[in-house]
Amino acid sequence: QNETSAAKEEVKALNARVEDLKTKLIKAVKKGKQLDDERQKLDASLQEKQKELLEAEARVSELQGTVQTHLVELDSAAKQKVDLLAQLEQLKSAQESAGSASAESLAQLQAKQAEVDALTASLEAMKASEAEWATAREALLADAHVAQGREDELAGQP
């Protein structure tokens, strides 16, 4: 009877061990499912970040083209300003050498000065616009860098 009792105790201990292992197995399966779900979420997030990165890169390229166009326009406006200033100086010189302040010369001088003022204002506006484009470009590059860092971080996770 001692042997039977000992055998029953051994069976009881083995059953308890089996139940413990079952519990651990169920927990491990649940944890594996959670990890798989998390990985799927991270994969989706990675794909979204990659898409955002591509969009940011496209936007940066677009902004670079726009900045280049503005630089050409600024250069052209600056040349026009120089030309108009030279014409203005020629008109002033011609007016002084003639010694007369005819109404026609004065009107031309005022018109040229108005053109110079308008071009100066346009040039200042273009400079401000160029600064805004540069700021936007830097922000997009920073976003692209962050997205790339996140992509690299996610790619390194199992």
Image: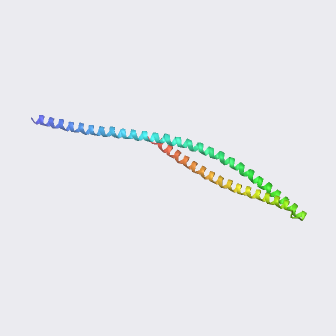
The quadrant of the rendering that contains the C terminus is: top left
Query: What residue lies at 65% left-to-right and 46% top-to-bottom?
Result: 66
Above or below 63: residue 85: below
Q: In this view, does 150 lie above or below 104?
A: above
Where residue 48 sits: x, y (%)? 49, 41
Determine which quarter of the picture holds residue 7.
Answer: top left
Could you tell me which residue is drawn at 83 percent across and 56 percent down?
Answer: 87
Which residue is farthest right? 98
Between 3 and 122, the one lying in front of the other is: 122
Give the farthest residue toward the left.
Answer: 1
- Depth check, front residue: 10 or 51: 51
Point 68% across, 49% down: residue: 70
Q: Which of 111 and 117 is in front in this view?
A: 111
> Which image quarter holds the N terminus?
top left
Q: Residue furthest front?
A: 103
Where is residue 47? Give x, y as percent: 49, 40
> Which of the 4 quarters of the picture holds residue 39?
top left
Question: Position of 154 compared to 136: left or right?
Answer: left
